[in-house]
Amino acid sequence: MIASVALFLAVSAAFLYWRYVYFFRNPDRKTPEGDNIVSPADGAVVYSKRLGPGEPVCTVKQGVVARIEDITKEVIDGEKILIGIFMSPFDVHYNRAPMTGAVERIQHHPAKTRNRHMWPMHWRIMVGRSPFYAQAAHIIENERTVTRFRGMFRGKETVCYVIQIAGQSVNGIDSYFSPGDAVRKGQIFGMIRIGSQVDLVVADPGAASVKVKAGDRVRAGETILIE
């Protein structure tokens, strides 16, 4: 009996520490200098693609194709780079600006019906089974906040989007900036509370080089995704 109570108290204490202390940790990050775009989130890369006009992102399941407008809720003409990052419940959940510039727009989009669980993607990442996006309907169906940034990259004005996608157990998507605010590369601009996904879309990237692939681990504000 005493052992059972002690175990219960230990598990409860560990859960409370994770939920209210460890989850909100905010370690310092050293943002790289130079002409590059950094990761907006900590986690595992689930897809890294250069997409042509009208080219689909992936087939989520039989008969269900994800397109860029399903993710951004906005039509983006021309070529673009898309990188998706899955954040497990044990990753740092603060999100950081991928580039220096200004916040142009922040739009919140509710779930199509209800938020789908991200367990299929989480499981495939844990066991290393690709493609990580298989059966991951949350990519196109779940609640999300889309933040549009504008800044300079490779000598020209560039637009990029950060899409914060909520999971079934998410308690909220936070944005700390407003449209028109200036941001620095690597600066914290928001967070998602508990496991989720963050996608980065860079419009008209030209000859920019993608530095990560599916399965890579990245850190917000520190890992170079594109240069």
Image (tube, helix red, strand yellow):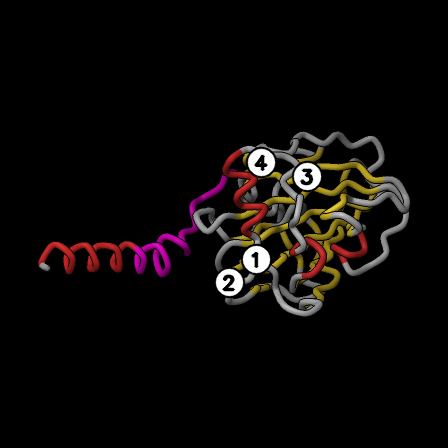
Q: Which mark is in front, 2 or 4?
A: 2
Q: Find the magenta span and give its range.
A: 15-32
**Gap in angstroms between the C-alphas marked 1 and 3:** 18 Å
The residue shown at (75%, 29%) is 209
The mark that comes first in sequence, 3 or 4, is 3
**Gap in angstroms between the C-alphas marked 2 and 4:** 27 Å
Q: Nearer the viewer, residue 54 or 161?
A: 54
Above or below, 50 against 111 in this view is: above
Quarter holding the N terminus is: bottom left
**Gap in angstroms between the C-alphas marked 1 and 2:** 8 Å
Q: According to the image, label 4 marks what residue? A: 223
Callout 4, which amino acid? Answer: Thr
Q: Where is residue 153 in the image (x, y as percent from the top left)?
A: 76, 40
Q: According to the image, label 2 marks what residue? A: 169
Q: Nearer the viewer, residue 74 or 102?
A: 74
Above or below, 57 against 24 in this view is: above
